[in-house]
Image (cartoon, helix red, strand yellow):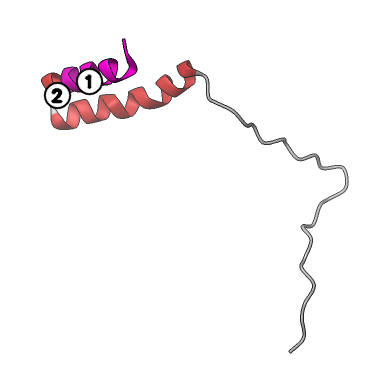
Amino acid sequence: MAHAAPRTPFRRPGRLERPRRTGRRHPLVATAMALPLAALLLLVFDGWNTVATQASSVGVMLGR
């Protein structure tokens, strides 16, 4: 059996790769991503009391 050399990725000349972002997402961006899902779950399950209870639990867990 022949062993093949690993292939290197093909890069076009002149094309720049965007550097990957490392670190944390800004809290406002994370909130903007989470709010639509939270609103959908609120409408689907129709639970204002449940949402208030969970929000309170998260607040206690975060120490606020």
Residue at 55% across / 26% down in the picture? 24
Q: Position of residue 47 (x, y in %)?
A: 13, 24
Q: Which residue is mark 1?
A: 57
Residue type, numbered disc 1: Ser
Q: Position of residue 60 (x, y in %)?
A: 26, 16
**Left or right of 27 in this view: 4:** right
Q: Position of residue 30 (x, y in %)?
A: 45, 23
Q: Main secondary structure of the magenta part?
A: helix
**Left or right of 34 in this view: 2:** right
Q: Which residue is mark 2?
A: 50
Q: Is residue 26 above or below residue 11?
A: above
Q: Nearer the viewer, residue 14 or 34?
A: 34
How crowded pointer 1 is (Cα within 10 Å; few <14, some 14-19, many 20+) is rated as few
Residue 7 location, quadrant: bottom right
Count of marks overlaid on the render: 2
Residue 5 location, quadrant: bottom right
Residue at 14% across / 24% down in the picture? 50
- Contact check, label 1 and label 2, Cβ < 8 Å: no
* Secondary structure under the numbered disc 2 in the rendered image: helix
* Mark 1 to mark 2 CA distance (whole Å): 11 Å
Residue type, numbered disc 2: Thr
* Secondary structure under the numbered disc 1 in the rendered image: helix
- Residue stretch in magenta: 51-64
Residue at 88% across / 47% down in the picture? 13
Which badge, 1 or 2, comes first in the chain's sequence? 2
Q: Is residue 6 above or below residue 50?
A: below
The quarter of the rendered structure image containing the C terminus is top left
Residue 48 lies within the magenta run: no
Q: Position of residue 14 (x, y in %)?
A: 87, 42
